[in-house]
Image: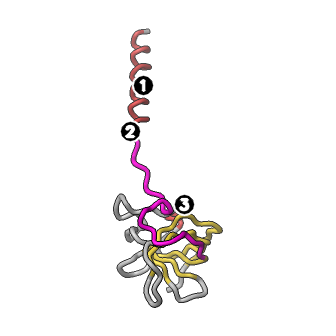
Amino acid sequence: MILELRIALMALVGALVMSTHRTPTPPLCRARSDLVGKCFTVHGALRYWNGGTPVRIWRIGTTRVLGVRGLDEVGLPSDSSACPLPAGLRDTLQAGKEVIADFVVCPLTPSPPGSMQYVCVDAATNIRAKPYRF
């Protein structure tokens, strides 16, 4: 009986310790303090690219490309201040595939003609993945 009580008490203490030790939640894109404008929706194709900004969104029907800032070559945040891709989106994004969706993006830089605008991705709807032909 005493042994069972000790085991139950240890389990309770362990559960309390685990519940108080939480990893910090990553920042939400739209809550960033460094946004230069309002978030907007864009229909585009998210895929890996070669170069300094490995994750980009091509705005379908245009020649504009948006750089997703703060992500490394596998789509993970490169540091703790970077916003991750929305849930399920990074798992869908793979080399050789593109993710077509309606993305809610928030601008981190202005949009000058002829230059890439940097954004963070806040949300995505109507998501579908398809093979990308290089």
- For label 1, the crowd category at 10 Å Cα-Cα, with few meaning under 14, some 14 to 19 and many 20 or more, is few
**Figure check: 86 above or below 117:** above
The residue under the point 36% across, 81% down is 51
Residue type of the residue flagged with mark 2: His
Q: Residue at x 54, y 70 (%)?
A: 38
Task: Give the SS element for disc 2.
Answer: loop
Q: Which residue lies at the image location 44% right of the left edge and 83% below the top edge?
A: 116
Quarter of the image for the N terminus: give it.
top left
Q: Secondary structure at mark 3?
A: loop
Rendered location of residue 128, percent (x, y): 62, 70
**Along the line of sight, the residue nearer the viewer: 30 or 62:** 30
Is residue 47 on the magenta stretch?
no
* Dominant SS type (magenta): loop
Q: Is residue 54 visible?
A: yes
**Mark positioned earlier in the residue sequence (1 or 2):** 1
Distance of label 3 from label 2 (alpha carbons): 25 Å
Q: From what the image shows, is residue 130 above or below residue 92?
A: below
User: How far across and down, in percent of the image, does residue 44 sit?
Assistant: 58, 78
| Residue position marked by numbered label 2 in the rendering | 21
The image shows residue 77, relative to residue 62, as above or below, that is above
Q: Which quadrant holds residue 11? A: top left
Q: Position of residue 92 (x, y in %)?
A: 53, 66
- Numbered tag placed on residue 88 in the rendering: 3
Q: Amino acid type of disc 1?
A: Ala
Q: Is residue 80 left or right of residue 1?
A: left
Q: Does residue 96 appear in the picture of this structure?
A: no
Stretch in magenta: 21-42
Mark 1 and mark 2: Cα distance apart in space? 16 Å
Q: Is residue 27 magenta?
A: yes
Which badge, 3 or 2, comes first in the chain's sequence?
2
> In this rendering, which labeled residue sits more in front, label 3 or label 2?
2
Q: Secondary structure at mark 1?
A: helix
